[in-house]
Image: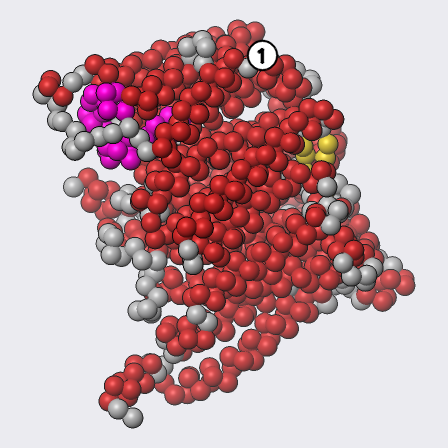
Amino acid sequence: MTDDQDQLQTKAGTSGPIVEMAVRIMTPFIQLFGLYVIAHGHYSPGGGFQGGVILGSAYILLGIAFNQQIAMRYFSERVNNMLASGGALIYVGTGVVCALLGGLFLDYSALDRILHLGPIEWRSMGIFIVEVGVGLTVMSIMTSLFWDLGSGGELEKGL
Amino acid sequence: MTGNLHIYVLALPLVGALLVNLLGRYSLRLVPPLVLGALALSFAAALKVLSGVLEHGAFSYTVGNWQPPFGIELVVDHLSALMLVLVSAVALVASFASLHSVARELADRQQHFFTLYLILIAGLHGLILTGDAFNLYVLLEITSITTYGLIAMGRGRAPLSSFNYIIMGSIAACFYLLGVGYLYILTGTLNMADIAHIFPTVQGNVAVATAFAFMLIGLWIKMAFFPLHGWLPRAYSDAPIGTGVLVAPLMTKVTVYLMIRVMFSVFTPQYEFFQHPGVQNAIVWVAALAIVCASILALGQRDLRRMLTYIIVAEVGYMVGGVWLANSQGLTGAILHIVNDALMTLCLFLVVAAIASRVGSLHFDNLTGLYRKMPLTMAAFTVGAFAMIGVPPTCGFYSKWYLILGGIEAGQWPYVVALVFSSLVNAVLFFRIIEIAYFRTEGDGHVPLPGPIAEAPQMILQPLLLAAVALILVGLATGPLVEQVIRVAVPGGL
Amino acid sequence: MDGLMSEIVAKYNYWIYVILMMIGFYAMLAKRNLVKKLFGLNIFQTAIILMFVSAGVKHGAKIPILDKHEVLEHGVNVAQVVNPLPHVLMLTAIVVSVSVTGVALAILQRIYRRYGTLEEDEILEKIKE
Amino acid sequence: MKKLAFVAVLLTGALLLYGTKDFPAWGDPMAPAAQHLSPTYIEKGVEQTHVPNIVTAVLGDYRGYDTMFETVVIYCAGIVVIGALRGWREDE
């Protein structure tokens, strides 16, 4: 290990090995919990917003425990932007597709014309689809808010 | 398929906005076609909606195919169809100038600017269509947040002005939400038509009066009605040019439309005007005061854009006063003035964009001798100025005519006097500038303008000329406009 | 006096919300520090959330999450379940409040960078210079 | 200024409290808010959408239009923060 890398390592690990190790172990479980909250929103408290915030908090935790550069290695600014727009596009797109299929705007039962599940089952499915869209947008925006506010708009420098 | 047309008016800019952000990152050349395409299609759909409404009458639409009080209802009647056409037309025309000036001012953040720009337009369309009191709050916040961002992208003082706007705008939205909450606790519903249906049973309650007062004050802050106007002049004059061109003509007018919507769709004219004539009288007096004070404040400005922002505040006084005159002439005048004022402000702010693109500064001293260098721009400015003053062939005359007729019919002399006074002040304001630009020469000891100045770029000049022609055309078409659209839109009971 | 007391006891939720609202509103109007103004805004919005949510309460009712099969077979006793609508509305209001806070913080950062302070008086003085 | 603000706040608070005079008591199951729309959501919600969590059903479907704009609101906030903050340091 050269001196250069060594310096990078110490700079990266500002919060000590215990915190870092704990965060390494916790992050995947937090993400799993976020996905569970989104997916189980039909049966228990939860849904897109809540789950999205939990997913976003996983990256925020990485950013706090290590630093912003390392967190952004896992979730780059480009992907972030795409997911944010993509999530909103899923929601609006679902509405428009419903309208184009001959139903009213956001009338999920119209999606029955694509795949026959029954109109009421499609309402349940439609809610799930839009919740996923909401979750993606909220996750990306929460992360990007933290990054931008934490670094004063200069992502490379970070925190 | 055609039943969903008005949804496309709203959805096209929204999808366009998301695509601008997704694709604009890879190539900025994709931004103008996306923006213009989305807005042009939206404008075409709005025209189709208006012609459909004129042919088949008003209809209501429920998002998600739920029965009205349970789902969210959208109302497409003559008034909202007219407003849809107005907003989409103004947005389309303004976007040419915005595209040009943003490409110069904020080159590296064009995609962010136009994402917010298109979402703002979608939000305005949503505000016009909605028939649900809480949905109105959400859309009010969408238009506000995008406007905060569009203003904060300016230089210099812009962030500070934007922050003041955030505080005032949030107070306004919170007040409106408090009013909606009180109505919800009393009636158990959020649908405007449903509230109006239950309204007679709760009419005498103090809570209803509280709800009405808070909703009204919230909307007044948003539209910058005189004593609550403090945030507007700074916010609009510090914003980037590309923001002003869109926001100044539309935001306050759409909020006035919302006030009309809330007053006549949720509450009843009987309740507002005739149960407590003292309140109605007082509000007309405040409107008259607003017109006079804002006009006097405009006289003190030495910057073209600052002066126009105070004129906007005065015009809000015209419209609020017209609505509260409590007769159909006044309301007709107010609705007609929404259309006319949006077009006049658009024309004048396009002039601002044109001058800013060539001269840079908008201070009066820098306008010296401008007519020889930018003859077409200044000709359009003159048309816009005549419309603001209210000279007959232009549209500004007709709406003022209706407002004055309404004022006389209601016997509200202070309001009539204020209108005439404000027209005179406008004449002074604009002739002062015309004098500087036409007759003063650089030899009179004034600083010569730096560098050679040519006519404004085509991207601004063409929309500007279009807007100036529209001022005259709308003026000539006032008769059919009033007979076929606005008279039908004026609610009964007046 | 008795009437007022019983009125307060019956509707103490509204009294609490109004007091919270007044704290927030006062901070927005009177404080000269921009961050304090923003905190005032947050308190104001929290007060409104309290008002809506407390309007949805029913005595002795449970959360609005039901058992699908039981409901489809036997129906549901409405008095046993709290009103879900205010919760939905307040989810929206919370998101709006988060968004406004984020935007305001970003703008405050730019103000701080330009003027080096967040006290309104000092900023106005610097502008005058 | 502070006194003026204090008076304004007191007035607002008093008006709001005065308005609660006509409200039903806290937790009253016979309140209009509990009687008009919400029984239908509770009774029909599961049947019409097959979602046992009624809050999710109302959020995602009955009032899905609201939720769509809510997503757009937070999306806007993200874009505003990027547009107003990122890369401004050099310019100023």
Q: What residue do we see at 44% from left, 65% from top?
A: A78
Vertical placement of residue D45 versus B424, above or below: below
Res B199 seen here: no
Q: Specify the segment rendered in magenta.
A: B347-374
Quadrant in which the N terminus of chain D appears: top left
Task: Identify which amino acid the numbered label 1 is placed on.
Answer: Gly
Please identify the dominant SS of the magenta region: helix
Q: Residue furthest bottom?
A: A1
Query: What residue sits right under mark 1 in the picture?
Result: B479
Q: Position of residue B452 (x, y in %)?
A: 18, 31
- Specify the quadrant of the image occupied by residue B351: top left
Res B332 seen here: yes
Vertical placement of residue B114 versus A158, above or below: above
Vertical placement of residue A142 versus B306, above or below: below
B222 or B57: nearer the viewer: B57
Q: Secondary structure at mark 1?
A: helix
Q: Position of residue D84 (x, y in %)?
A: 36, 52
Residue B360 highlighted magenta (yes or no): yes
